[in-house]
Amino acid sequence: MNSPVISSQWLRLIIMIVSMAVTAAHFKIPRLSPTLGTILEQPEILSAPVSEDLRTFYYTQTLDHFNYNPESYTTFQQRYVMNSKYWGGANVSAPILAYLGAESPLDGTPAAIGFLNDNAIRFKALIVYIEHRYYGKSIPFGSREEAFQNASTLGYFNSAQAIADYAAIIMHIKKKLQARYSPVIVIGGSYGGMLASWFRLKYPHVALGALASSAPILYFDEIPLQPEGGYYSVVTKDFREASETCYQTIQKSWSEINRVASKPHGLSTLSKKFKTCYPLTSSSELKSFLRLMYAYTAQYNRPPRYPVSVVCGGIDGASFGSQDDILTKIFSGVVAYYGNRSCYVNPETNASEIEIGWSWQRCSEMVIPIGIGNGTMLEASPFNLTSFIKQCESFYGVPSRPHWVTSYYGGHDIKLILHRFGSNIIFSNGLRDPYSSGGVLENISNSILAVSTVNGSHCLDILAERETDPEWLIRQRKIEVKIIKGWIAKYYADLKAFKQ
């Protein structure tokens, strides 16, 4: 049983995360998740039955791969899941498709991330899904309360440790199955896509290649290719292409919110107008809600629903209140997207393990400088690195490391550096995904390739195939499969020559 001290620390951390989201306009950036939009629009995925072909295992993982202090040898149980139904076996060195988990529990992943299962029969591949440390059931220190209590225990929670975990598990699986020569292709989406590309660069002896879907690896440390306002510039472009009048209404709405909020009882008026779950304490609560709604509808603007068109349809076709009332139109867009609810803004929610875990990662190393520049449909709000670091340090007691990602993995002058010293990575993007503004959109070499679609959204290519998939999406997946088949064919040729 946890001690009262630990429980109070856990409660303090939850309160801290919630307050961060409220007080820092850009602390709570849109989630780097391949499945968030899918779950919002298809909640049945989370309750979908797990395939009978999936088997769950636990690996005794080392807490700290990079030190030799006594505490570094502490272990924890890390979860992974395998499906060997289609595997051709170790005797023929059949491939392994390994999904690198990101900032969420593994539970709903096999159902949502369909690329592996959809293509396993084509490759005669073993399928592996590995859970990221500190999420789901892969918790160090015996409990979530203990693991998240302070920076001392959270210090082992970073991407470098995570990909070292993946290397250890993949090598364990290959040894256990006597599959020494089975080529491994690692796959990931969003933050997991970054992990997949970095894994290939750091562990080329473990993974033959990587499919990095919607991986914004260039959204760090003032890489010149990426302006900080890139994300919301794409959001604006998506909405403007859907409807000019919708774009203009959203653009005008911020000053209208400010005008109403400045009046006596203005926050009460806004609370009633937007059917908030609790009375607004500031207009920033409402604006933050709307900003993230627009961000997510653009990021996950997936067929066949296309949420941006849904929101704009509601805004342009407001059927209640005054047609000249900008805020009535905006609220109509909210209702169109979320459906009929008793309330919409600031619902009572408990901070999830994902939010708590991601807030640490965001503060420590995932310092993605998303700001809002001039010329978008939102209020301008530049990213302030100094303030960000100061706030993170006030919450966790340790400062952020905004230059660590580019120091450890690279990113600056990526074409020059990786042209000769990297290989076998697919960077896939949908150009309607705001995070594509930080993605690799041009080929770097003959084997580090950019595969993008004009109409695509966040991680759409690695989700499960559906009958309603448009032709351009089907074509994108076929290109990716063809590239991976080419890598494996070359590997087999090299293996044959090596064994002679």
Image (cartoon, rainbow, N blue to C red):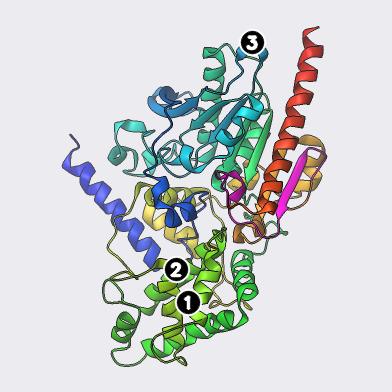
Rendered image: mark on residue 337 = 2
Q: Amino acid at mark 1?
A: Gly
Position of the C terminus, as image quadrant, is: top right
Q: Residue 420 occupies which quadrant of the picture?
A: top right
**Distance in Å between CA atoms under marks 3 and 2:** 52 Å
In front: 60, or 460?
460
Point 45% across, 57% down: residue: 41
Point 39% across, 57% down: residue: 394
Residue range of the region highlighted in magenta in the rendering: 444-467
On the question of residue 63 being in view, the answer is: no
Q: N-terminal of the two: label 3 or label 2?
A: 3
State yes or no: residue 458 in magenta.
yes
On the question of residue 444 being in view, the answer is: yes
Task: Name the residue that disc number 3 marks.
Answer: 91
Q: Amino acid at mark 2?
A: Tyr
Is residue 398 left or right of 308 when viewed as pictured?
A: left
Compared to 415, does 156 lie above or below?
A: above
Compared to 143, does 402 lie above or below?
A: below
Position of the N terminus, as image quadrant, is: top left
Q: N-terminal of the two: label 2 or label 1?
A: 1
Count every numbered label the image shows and give the total.
Answer: 3
- Position in image of residue 30 (x %, y %): 50, 59
* Disc 1 packing (10 Å; few <14; some 14–19; many ≥20): many
Point 58% across, 79% down: residue: 247
**Distance in Å between CA atoms under marks 2 and 1:** 8 Å
Q: Residue 338 occupies which quadrant of the picture?
A: bottom left
- Position in image of residue 206 (x %, y %): 63, 24
The reply to whether callout 3 and callout 2 are in contact (CB within 8 Å) is: no
Task: Name the residue that disc number 1 marks.
Answer: 314
The reply to whether callout 2 and callout 1 are in contact (CB within 8 Å) is: yes
